[in-house]
Image (cartoon, rainbow, N blue to C red):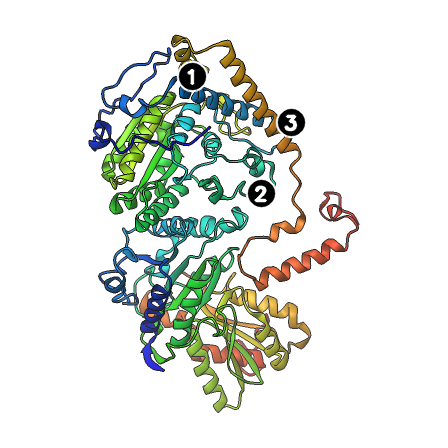
Amino acid sequence: MSTDQTGQGGAQAPGSSGKSAGPDHELLQLITPAGERISHPEFDVWVKDITDEQLCSLFEDMTVIRRIDVEATALQRQGELGLWPPLLGQEAAQIGSGRALRADDFVFSSYRENGVAYCRGVDLTDLLRVWRGNASGGWDPYSVNMATPQIIIGAQTLHATGYAMGIQNDGADSVAVTYFGDGATSEGDVNEAMVFAASFQVPVVFFCTNNHWAISEPVRLQSHIHLADRAAGFGIPSLRVDGNDVLAVMAATRVALDRARRGGGPTFIEAVSYRMGPHTTADDPTRYRDANELEDWAAKDPITRVEALLDRKGLLTEALQQQVADKADAVASELRRGCTTMPDPQPLDIFKHVYSTPNSWLERQQDHYARYLASFGDPAGAVSEEGAR
Amino acid sequence: MTQMTFARAINAGLRKSLENDSKVVLLGEDIGTLGGVFRVTDGLQKDFGKHRVVDTPLAESAIVGTAVGLAYRGYRPVVEIQFDGFIYPAFDQIVSQVAKLHYRTRGTVKMPITIRVPFGGGIGSPEHHSESPEAYFTHTSGLRVVTVANPQDAYTVIQQAIACDDPVLYFEPKRRYHDKGEVDEAADPGSALPMDKARVLASGSDVTLVAYGPLVRTALDAATAAADEGISIEVIDLRSLAPVDYEPVVASVRKTGRLVVTHEAGQSGGLGAEVAASITERCFYHLEAAPVRVTGFDIPYPYSKLEMHHLPGLDRILDGVDRALGRPNSLSGLEG
C-alpha cells in the first residue's frame, strides 16, 4: 500500500497528447485474462517503472481488499454491521487507480471505493463506522485527502470539480479525482460537473467504474454507447480501459493525472469491470441477472489474472502466497477487532457538529432532550420499544 | 455615512469581503461582465479578476456543488442564485451536501458558503421570478437562513454571512433593491448586531407585528397608519429565519399579549406557523388572542396583474392587527 511519488516525471508520452475521444474506443488492456502481458505502443511507457516487486505488491493490495470485503460482508451477516457495499470484482480498478495518485491529490468517491480508501491510508476501523451506524462519515477527509464517501449518486463529481477549481486558483499541480459508477453517468450532477470541468479546464479526473449494474439496472439502460464516448460531447478526452487489468488502469490513470498536472484539464476514464457481488448486502442479484453472466466475468477476474502473470514470470512462489495470505489474515483480524471494539456513540452525540457555531434552536432542543433522558434512570430505557413507564 | 441603494450596499459589503479575505470567491450566472441582472456584483470582476468573480455555465446544482468543492479546498464561496425560482435545481446540493457535510465529517470539514437569493415579488415579473422559498431551507438542519430589510443590514449582514463558518442562505428582497438608506461603511461587522438576532424597529404596546425581508417596510408603514387610529404596534424585524431569535418576540408578546406575523410566502408550513407555534408555547398565558398570520396564499406565485392580491399589503396587515385586537375586521363573525 503506497501512493505514487514518482509518476512519469512529466515525460511527454503519446497517450498524454492526443485528445482522442472517437466513437471506436478500443479497450485498453495490458494483461489478458489469461495473465499474458501484452505490449501496447502508447501505454507501456506509463507502467515501465512497475518492477516485479511492485507487481507483487499490487497483487497483495488487491488480495487484501478482497479479504476486507469478505470480512466486512461476514460482519454484516453476523449482525455487526447494518449494511456493506461489496467491491468484489473491482479490485484492479480501485488499486490500479488508487496507487497512481499522489498524497496531495484529493479523492471524492462513492460508497464502493473501499479499496481506494485503503490506498489512501484510511484506518480500517474508520472504513466501518458508517456501516456500523456509529457515524455519518468515517474519517477526517484532510488526514488522507479523501472525502468521506458520497451516497447521493454522482453528487461528488461536482465537489471534485469545485476542488479542482481551487487547485487551479492556487496554482498547485495536484489533481482532484472523482469516482462514480455507470448509473451515475445519467445524473444531472455528473453531466454538469463535466460541463464545468471542460469550461474551466480544471485538473480533475472523472473515473467511472462501469461495473455493468446500478442495483438492478443494466448499463444498457443508462446508455446505448460506450460511457467513455459520452465525454467527447463535453470536449473531454476519454479512455476506455479494461477495469479488471490493474496495469492498464494504472496506465490510464497516470495519463489522466499527468494531463491534469500539466494544465491539460479533465479526463474521463471508463474502467470496464463487473460487480461480482450484490449492490449491497441487502440486495439479491439473482432476481435480475443471469448466472451465466457472472460466470463469464469470473473468467476475467482481476486477481486471478495478476496471479497468472506472476506465475508466468516465475514470481508466484509459495513464500509470496504465504506472505500475502498472512497479510490478508492480519488485516481481516484487525478489521474485525476494530469493528467489535468500536465504542458506541452517546445519545447526545446526535446534536454535535450540526453547526460549527452556537445555534439557539438546537441548543434548546438538546437541553430539553437531555432533561428528558435524565428523567430516566437508564437513558437506554428512554428509547426501548416497550417503553420504561 | 453614505446614502446608497440596497443593491449598492450589498455590492459594497461583497467588495469589503473580497478585499479582506483572499479566500472569498463569487460564483454565479452573469455576475461578472454584466455585474448581475440586478447589478449587485457590478464592477467586482473588473476589480478582483475572473478567478475571484466567476461567471459560471448555467447550472445551479453545479454552481452550488462546485462551491462545496471550493469550500473543501479552504475557500469561502459566495454564490448567487439569479432568482428565487431558479434555486430548485440546486436543492439536492444545498440540502444533502452544503447543509450536512459538517455533520457528516464530524466537524472536520467546514462549509462557509453563502448563497445569495433575490427573493419575493412585487416587480411585475413572470412565474419563477417572485417566489419566497425560505421555508424549504429553514426546515433543513445545518443551514442558517437570514434576510435583510434595509441597506445598512444588507451591507453588514452579507459580511457576517461570508465570515460565518456555517453555510448561510442570504435572502435579498429584490423589490427593495432600489430603496435608499444611510450606510456606515466603516461599521465593523464583528461588533454590529449579529445576523442571528432579531431587531425591534418600533416599540409599541398593543400588538406585536413580526415581519422580515420586503415586508418590514410595509409593517412599519402599517404601524404608522395604525398610530393615527390610536393603535400602538411594536414592529420586529425577524432578520434571521433559522434560527429565529425568539427572545425579543417573547418579551414583546409578554407586553402586548397579541401577535401578528406576516410574510409573502404561502401560509401552510411557513415561518408564520413556526413563530405562532413557538410563541404560543412560550407565552400562552400572556396571549390575549390567538396569533394571526397575514401571508401569501397557498397558490403558485400568480401572474403579475394580480400579484398585489397575493402579497400582504398595508391594509391586509392592518386587518390582521384588527383581528388580533378583537376589533371589527373582514373575518368578524367567522368561527375559527
The residue wearing badge 3 is: A78
Q: Which residue is mark 2?
A: A135
Q: Which structural element holds mark 3?
A: loop
Q: Report the residue marked by disc 1.
A: A301
For the residues labelled 3 and 2, say whether their Cβ atoms are less than 8 Å apart.
no
Which is nearer the eye, A15 or A206?
A: A15
Front-most of A268 and B127?
A268
Residue at left 29%, top 14%? A38
- Dot 2, crowdedness within 10 Å: few (<14), some or many (≥20)? many
Q: Chain of mark 3?
A: A
Q: Are marks 1 and 2 on the same chain?
A: yes
Q: Quadrant of residue B178?
A: bottom left
Percent position (x, y) of residue B132?
A: 41, 63
Residue appearing at x 44%, y 67% in the figure = B160
Dividing the picture into quadrants, the one containing residue B296 is: bottom left
Measured as percent of width and height from the top left, residue A33 is found at 37, 13
Amino acid identity at mark 1: Asp
C-alpha distance separating marks 1 and 3: 27 Å
Q: Earlier in the sequence, mark 1 or mark 2?
A: 2
Alpha carbons under labels 3 and 2: distance apart: 20 Å
Separation (CA) of disc 1 from disc 2: 33 Å
The chain letter for the residue carrying disc 2 is A
Name which residue type carries label 2.
Answer: Ala
Could you tell me which secondary element the residue under label 2 belongs to? loop
